[in-house]
């Protein structure tokens, strides 16, 4: 089974984010980056499928040169090779632009299965995996918590709301998005880290893919919300206070 895993590099959770002067993104110079957490679960699931059914796992990531570190971490954990879609301004892409770029970069791979995390920790759109499936013309399922593969088909457990689950079946090839918590991601071993140095990372310039930069949506401004607070004492009898409080919650706070 040939499995493609799309892993995104995002700002570290404890990184002190500072907004760039233009307000469209963050200043990257002084912060650390890490693998997007949901994508880590997707990578682990791909490695488990490889161990059970054989084949290879290819880690794919898009971004500037620093993104190769995320690919190398995937290789150290057991992925067989990597594909780096090089683009210094990938953060300007909307989910459709990202999906188009990813689809174009993997045209010659013919993956049996593509795994992505449910959403990214930085922008959290949760759309790229589904759009990728549509562009590739493949069946897809989201929020997957369990995968069973047998005779060219998959039985998948989807997480719904309020503790409910749904079982669906898909033929291969397919695209699925993985929910966090589906497994326990492994750590890279020293042997894996050493082996990763010899594994191939193919670099593809996104500009060479011929994908137009037209966007269906864009981030106008990133800013830190202003913190405001106001204290007001309500006087009167308990009945009057309750009535006034209800009125304020309904018409001023708009929480009722």
Image (cartoon, rainbow, N blue to C red):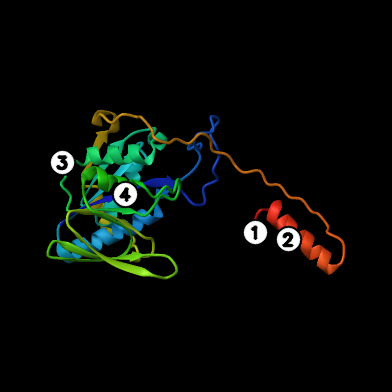
Instruction: Give the quadrant of the C terminus.
Output: bottom right
Q: Which is in the foreground here, disc 3 or disc 4?
A: 4
Instruction: Determine which residue is flagged by label 4.
Output: 129
Mark 2–mark 4 distance (CA, rounded to whole Å): 44 Å
SS class, disc 3: loop
**Front-most of 203 and 49?**
49
SS class, disc 1: loop
Q: Are marks 4 and 1 in contact (CB under 8 Å)?
A: no
Task: Name the residue rendered at 51%, 47% in the picture.
Answer: 15
Residue 189 at least partly seen: no
Looking at the picture, how far across and down is residue 228, in whole percent?
71, 47
Mark 4–mark 1 distance (CA, rounded to whole Å): 36 Å
Looking at the picture, how far across and down is residue 18, in whole percent?
55, 39
Quadrant of residue 158 within the rendered picture: bottom left
Within-10-Å neighbours for mark 2: few <14, some 14–19, many 20+: some
Mark 1–mark 2 distance (CA, rounded to whole Å): 8 Å
Instruction: Determine which residue is flagged by label 2.
Output: 246
Q: Are marks 3 and 1 in contact (CB under 8 Å)?
A: no
**Mark number, residue 256:** 1
Instruction: Give the quadrant of the N terminus.
Output: bottom left
Residue 228 left/right relative to 184: right
Within-10-Å neighbours for mark 3: few <14, some 14–19, many 20+: few
N-terminal-most mark, 3 or 1: 3
Quadrant of residue 54 within the rendered picture: bottom left
Within-10-Å neighbours for mark 1: few <14, some 14–19, many 20+: few
Residue 195 left/right relative to 231: left
Q: Which is in the foreground here, disc 2 or disc 3?
A: 2
Image position of 130 with respect to 145: above or below: above
Mark 2–mark 3 distance (CA, rounded to whole Å): 62 Å
């Amino acid at each position: 089974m040939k499995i493609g895993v799309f892993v995104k590099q995002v700002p570290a959770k404890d990184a002190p984010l500072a907004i760039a002067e233009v307000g469209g993104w963050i200043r990257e110079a002084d912060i650390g980056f890490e693998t997007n957490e949901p994508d880590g679960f997707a990578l682990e699931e791909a490695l488990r499928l490889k161990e059970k059914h054989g084949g290879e796992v290819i880690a794919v990531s898009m971004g500037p040169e620093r993104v190769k570190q995320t690919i190398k971490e995937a290789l150290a954990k057991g992925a067989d090779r990597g594909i780096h879609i090089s683009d210094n301004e990938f953060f300007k892409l909307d989910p459709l632009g990202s999906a188009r770029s990813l689809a174009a970069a993997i045209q010659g791979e013919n993956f049996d299965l593509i795994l992505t995390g449910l959403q990214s920790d930085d922008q959290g759109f949760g759309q790229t995996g589904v759009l990728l499936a549509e562009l590739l013309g493949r069946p897809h399922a989201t929020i997957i918590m369990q995968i069973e593969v047998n005779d060219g088909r998959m039985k998948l457990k989807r997480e719904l709301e309020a503790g409910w689950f749904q079982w669906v079946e898909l033929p291969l090839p397919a695209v699925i998005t993985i929910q966090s918590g589906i497994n326990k991601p492994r750590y890279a071993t020293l042997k894996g880290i050493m082996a990763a140095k010899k594994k191939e990372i193919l670099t593809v310039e996104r500009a060479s893919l011929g994908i137009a930069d037209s966007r269906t949506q864009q981030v106008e401004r990133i800013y830190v919300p202003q913190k405001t607070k106001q204290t007001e004492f309500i006087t009167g009898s308990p009945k009057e206070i309750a009535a006034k409080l209800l009125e304020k919650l309904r018409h001023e706070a708009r929480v009722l």
